[in-house]
Image (cartoon, rainbow, N blue to C red):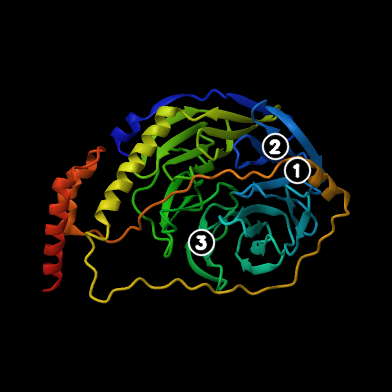
């Protein structure tokens, strides 16, 4: 539960969009930034996918007929090579277009609409979740199915690869259940929550802390909307730490910055909230009318969300308040600095002969390629939507952290005062302390 001091510390204001994208004629379901942060792609119930120039705020290209019905989900790979589009099709097809060449690949297997997708961090694998209650994983380069179907009891609302692509987090559309699947063994490792329910929610899930935890908005009971954000253990799905509390109605959007410092959430309580992820502190709360979905730009300097009403469907892009972003990163830096000192090799007390276990790589099973037919008109239109776009080779920010090992109690209290100070400690005082405390720890372990 958030403390009163945390709540009162958050400023409240109205987000004023710096850019508004108009053009869709019906509900906008999904948006995704290109890695350069200068372009965006969107998908809508009007059966179109559109690409936008964020410098001019104008639509670059529109493509119709990509899906036979609504476009539910769009995604751009982190290297900017692939754009993936899914939605309502009779045979549950998922389409990926290679931006540089315009080549379109079709991924088949689902029997109902594609509700969500995710591309692995290394841009090799594509996961598709469907209203048929299954998830399938393909190799983007070869087009081969490498895992799945992973079968659930309810339609799939969100999927997310771990950064090493060995695990897949699956949140069901009811917002009541989160599953953890092993990609190699194709087995369900853990589950939290219950199946069933009539609610529908599409907020995403995220892996954090070097794949040790998962962030998701979940509902603890059948009669409530998912309005609380939890952090779950990445192996057991046990709740870790305190929850992010503050929303009073359905959470419709969730976004985590690439460096893991800032968490943004949108809700039908007509607010958008910005949190310092490490401390759970609510940094800012903004009034926003019916915000639906929410994403952060690659550098987290922009925040984009959709507004869908009876009379208007648009994408609003706002500047992230610089002081809020700075505050979140300062908190993350201090926490990382403390963990680095606490868990450094100098302060660890390893038993004699201790060695880190090797990481084994198990090849995935190969299944025949999906059907490819680049002659169909819809694929030509999808190719035309992206053909002009140059391949982007921009660097994306990444989060580098030390693993969270058990606390070294001998060293904890001596470093606590030092780590609270953001300035660099004087090595003349730290080095003798580290050596002394390390020897004490070795003495204690010898008992």
Q: Is residue 411 above or below residue 286?
A: below
- Alpha-carbon span between mark 1 and mark 3: 28 Å
Q: Quadrant of the C terminus?
A: bottom left
Quarter-of-image position of residue 438: bottom left
Mark closest to the chain's N terminus, 2 or 1: 2
Q: Is residue 250 above or below residue 363?
A: above
- 277 left or right of 62? left
Can residue 47 be seen here? The reply is: no
Seen at 75% across and 68% down, the residue is 369
- Alpha-carbon span between mark 3 and mark 2: 34 Å
Query: Callout 1: 10 Å neighbours few (<14), some, many (20+)?
Result: many
Q: Secondary structure at mark 3?
A: loop
**Residue 424 coordinates in the image, percent (x, y):** 24, 40
**Residue 21 coordinates in the image, percent (x, y):** 67, 28
- 167 left or right of 432? right
Can residue 320 be seen here? The reply is: yes
- Alpha-carbon span between mark 2 and mark 1: 22 Å
Kindly indicate whether the residue at mark 1 contacts the one at mark 2 (C-beta within 8 angstroms). no
Task: Identify the residue position indicated by label 2 in the image.
Answer: 27
- Which residue is at the front of the view, 151 or 404? 404
- Which residue is at the front of the view, 15 or 388? 388
Task: Identify the residue position indicated by label 1 in the image.
Answer: 386
Task: Identify the residue position indicated by label 3 in the image.
Answer: 164
How many numbered marks are there?
3
Residue mark closest to the camera, 3 vs 2: 3
Query: Callout 2: 10 Å neighbours few (<14), some, many (20+)?
Result: many
């Amino acid at each position: 539960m958030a403390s009163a001091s945390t709540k009162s510390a958050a400023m409240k204001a109205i987000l004023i969009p710096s850019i508004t994208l108009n053009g869709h004629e019906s509900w906008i379901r999904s948006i995704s930034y290109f890695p350069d942060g200068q372009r965006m792609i969107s998908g809508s119930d009007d059966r179109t996918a559109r690409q936008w120039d964020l410098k001019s705020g104008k639509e670059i290209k529109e493509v119709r007929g990509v899906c036979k019905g609504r476009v539910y989900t769009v995604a751009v790979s982190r290297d900017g090579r692939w754009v993936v589009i899914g939605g309502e099709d009779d045979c549950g097809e998922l389409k990926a277009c290679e931006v540089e060449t315009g080549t379109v690949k079709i991924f088949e297997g689902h029997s109902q609409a594609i509700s969500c997708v995710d591309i692995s961090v290394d841009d090799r694998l594509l996961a598709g979740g469907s209203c048929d209650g299954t998830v399938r994983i393909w190799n983007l380069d070869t087009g081969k199915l490498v895992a799945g179907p992973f079968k659930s009891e309810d339609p799939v609302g969100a999927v997310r690869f771990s950064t090493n692509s060995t695990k897949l987090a699956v949140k069901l559309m009811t917002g009541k259940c989160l599953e953890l699947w092993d990609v190699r063994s194709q087995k369900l490792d853990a589950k939290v929550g219950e199946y069933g329910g009539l609610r529908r929610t599409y907020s995403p899930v995220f892996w954090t802390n070097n794949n040790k935890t998962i962030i998701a908005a979940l509902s603890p009971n059948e009669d409530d909307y998912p309005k609380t954000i939890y952090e779950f253990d990445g192996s057991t799905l046990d709740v870790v730490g305190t929850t992010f509390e503050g929303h009073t109605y359905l959470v419709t959007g969730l976004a985590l910055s690439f460096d893991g410092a800032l968490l943004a959430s949108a809700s039908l309580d007509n607010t958008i909230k910005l949190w310092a992820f490490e401390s759970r502190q609510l940094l800012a709360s903004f009034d926003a009318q019916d915000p639906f979905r929410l994403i952060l730009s690659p550098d987290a300097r922009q925040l984009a969300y959709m507004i869908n009403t009876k009379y208007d469907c648009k994408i609003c892009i706002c500047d992230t308040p610089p002081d809020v972003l700075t505050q979140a990163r300062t908190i993350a830096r201090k926490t990382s600095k403390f963990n680095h000192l606490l868990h450094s090799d100098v302060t660890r007390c390893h038993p004699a002969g201790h060695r880190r276990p090797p990481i084994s790589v198990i090849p995935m099973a190969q299944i025949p390629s999906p059907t490819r037919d680049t002659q169909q008109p819809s694929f030509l239109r999808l190719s035309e939507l992206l053909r002009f776009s140059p391949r982007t080779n921009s660097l994306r920010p990444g989060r580098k952290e030390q693993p969270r090992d058990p606390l070294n109690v001998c060293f904890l209290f001596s470093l606590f005062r030092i780590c609270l100070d953001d300035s660099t400690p004087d090595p003349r005082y730290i080095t003798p302390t580290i050596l002394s405390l390390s020897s004490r720890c070795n003495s204690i372990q010898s008992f």
